[in-house]
Amino acid sequence: MNRNVQLLWNGLIPENPIFRLALSMCPAVAVTTSVENGLMLGLAVIFVQVFSSCTVAMFRSYIHPRIRIPAYVIVIALWVTVIDMILPVISPDVYKKVALFVKLIVVFAIIISRLELFASKEPLVPSFFDGLGMGLGFTFGLVVIGAIRELFGTGKLFGIDVFDSGPLLIMILPAGGFFVIGFLMGLFNWIEYKLTGKIPTSGGAH
Amino acid sequence: MWTVSATLMPVLLLSIYNFGLRSLILTVISVVSCVVIEAICQKVMGRKVSVSDGSAVLTGILMAFVIPPGVPYYLPIIGAFAAIFIAKELMGGIGYNVWNPALVGRAFLQAAFPVAITTAWIPPEQLAKAPITVFLSPGSVDAISTATPLGVLKQFGMAALTDQFGSLSSIYYNFFIGFKPGCIGETSGLLILLGGLFLIFRGIITWHIPVATIVSAGFMAWLIGGPSIGTGNPIVHVFSGGLMLGAFYMCTDYVTSPTLKSAQIIFGAGVGILTVLIRVKGGYPEGVCYAILLMNCLTPALDDWFQPKRFAPPKAAPVAASK
């Protein structure tokens, strides 16, 4: 398989940021009360991740290793500022709900860990695909969690009524977020066990 | 486990007298769904199916006893899922659960259906006279709902309590016998006390946890329950809500309570103090459920802090040297 495709696939399933690496769990619990919120934040993260990875990959020989973390933060902050200005123009309503977390993308663990582990060592093109894969994987996770929580918590999907018999309020509370993420992680582990026959080790061990 | 369940049967009978057949139906649904879910879980997880040990039955009874009698019939099924699947089988099965399964089910229901679980109270001895159709409707019965003593006490104070439930002596009498609005199995202090004494007499539980819980809750209620320090009414607090049921049947769960007697007294005292703190200072009118769940978290630490005394002499120490 082409390495770039492999990097893309790697971020989506085998090293999914939420279900495998267990990074950026705080926004994964906090904003996933509906599909729309999860999708919007996911798109913002794809944008920031891709552009930050490309920027760091291009300038990686100029960044002194000792000050790399502050430099990465400045790069991420730059792209977060850009998306923070674009998003309210595209969709003001959703921006109101995710505004706080869009600003907090600066400190999302997933972005800085990809810069540190990948973009600082690899050239531009693989870094682009790694960033895109990780962003897509994060969006995939947020959308799945958001869909389950919205469906069971409010009986709706994308704001459209699906069923209306006694929704479980706990699903849109933070506790429900933890339950859903825990069960999905277990599901991922189970699928991997069935496919490979090996008991999965903790995903975050790089 | 079967003996414990058997001692709860008089409580169920009184509840049927108080709140009508609805409480029996809810209890049966709860027990059946607990047993079925446990059997399915153990089958799927490849464990030995052990529903005949009676622990799932007891969990079902206790969970039904701490939900109001007017809730919809599907509620205990969802609660049983949380209690058996999440709190028991996912933790590793019986013996490995950190929290009391029945109370996890109740806490899950409280978070999932906050309206149904806090408003579906039924005044005692009225539903027994209601038409049979009330029991057949699967929805919640809110047409004849009322408020619990603790809810009245929390919102309106002691004067409103005596207004609604009669003079202080009749409050004592009714609350002790069990004629008051409340959850299905928590109303009767007398029957729970008798059942608990029987369990202590048979050596199934010891007196340490219940006594510590009730004494500390009474003391705390006297201390902070009234308008000023030391003017609260301990008897009203001890005999309302689920304190008696919690003290005798839920705190004393073998798996989730500490082993050593001294640790058990600390455990019980913690439950009593937290219960009254949540009731008086917290946002909820009733706090037994959360108090027990919180102290369950401390059980491993209590077991660690209170190690049993070692009777064998320490290694390499001269045995005859002491004294």
Image (cartoon, grey):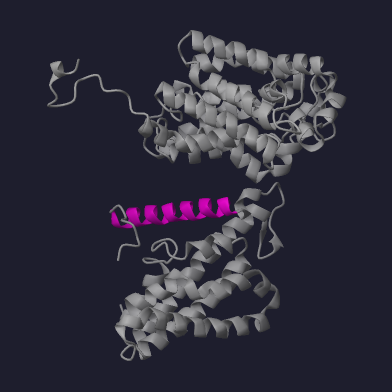
- In the picture, residue B303 is in which quadrant? top left
Q: Is A174 placed above or below A84 here?
A: above
> Residue A150: image x %, image y %?
63, 58
Q: Is A205 placed above or below A164 here?
A: below
**One can see residue A122 in this view:** no
Q: Is residue B5 magenta?
A: no
Outermost residue, front direction? B323
Residue at 45 percent across and 11 percent down: it is B203
> Residue B103: image x %, image y %?
56, 34
Q: Left or right of A93: which side holds B307? A: left
**Predominant SS of the magenta segment:** helix
Q: Nearer the viewer, residue B265 or B251?
A: B265
> Residue B274: image x %, image y %?
59, 34
Residue at 49 percent across and 77 percent down: it is A46
Residue at 70 percent across and 63 percent down: it is A160
Q: Left or right of B38: which side holds A192? A: left
- In the picture, residue B15 is in which quadrant? top right
Residue at 51 percent across and 14 percent down: it is B3
Q: Is B281 placed above or below A135 here?
A: above
Q: Left or right of B222: which side holds A59? A: left
Q: Is residue A178 magenta?
A: yes
> Residue B323: image x %, image y %?
20, 15
**One can see residue A46 in this view:** yes
Q: Nearer the viewer, residue B75 or B32?
A: B75
Q: Is B157 placed above or below A80 here?
A: above
Outermost residue, right direction? B163
Q: Nearer the viewer, residue A99 or B285?
A: B285
Q: Which region shows up in magenta? A: A174-197
